Amino acid sequence: MPRKSDWDFGCDDCRDDSNRFYGHLDQIGSNADRGMILLRCPRCNALYEDTPAGPDQTLRLTGDEAHTLYPGSI
């Protein structure tokens, strides 16, 4: 797994764990089959996939990736 410093975050708000973990990013989609949710930063509009509970698995997504994994969400 990449080190947190290697992850591609959109802005300082996205980078802050407490913003991602405690609902400060907008949840705009979910994929029950994958057990993941789609998040969007309200400040910079960066898109992320993460687990709704349990260990953090934040992954930055492109718009195309988000559209493919979460159709109709963006």
Image (cartoon, grey):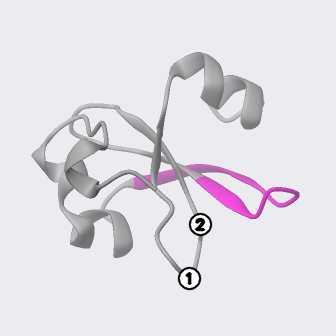
Residue 72 pos. (x, y %): 75, 30
Kind of residue indicated by mark 1: Gly
Q: Amino acid at mark 2?
A: Thr
Q: Residue at x 83, y 61 (%)?
A: 32
Front-most of 2 and 55?
2
Disc 2 on helix, strand or loop?
Answer: loop
Q: Is residue 31 magenta?
A: yes
Packing grade of label 1 (10 A; few <14, some 14-19, many >=20) is: few
Q: Main secondary structure of the magenta part?
A: strand
Task: State yes or no: discs 1 and 2 in contact (Cβ < 8 Å).
Answer: yes
Above or below, 65 against 2 in this view is above
Question: Does 3 sit left or right of 16 as displayed?
Answer: right
**Cα distance, mark 1 to mark 2?**
7 Å
Report the magenta residues as a range: 26-37
Which residue reaches farthest top?
A: 64
Q: Which residue is mark 1?
A: 54
Q: Position of residue 71 (x, y in %)?
A: 77, 30
Q: How many marks?
A: 2
- Residue 14, how many percent across, how many down? 24, 49
Does the magenta-highlighted stretch encompass residue 4? Answer: no
Question: Is residue 36 visible from the viewing direction of this image?
Answer: yes
Quarter of the image for the C terminus: give it. Answer: top right
Q: Residues within 10 Å of mark 2 (few under 14, many from 20)?
A: some
Using the image as rendered, state which of residue 3 and residue 37 is in the foreground: 3
Name the residue located 67 percent from the left edge and 35 percent from the top edge: 73
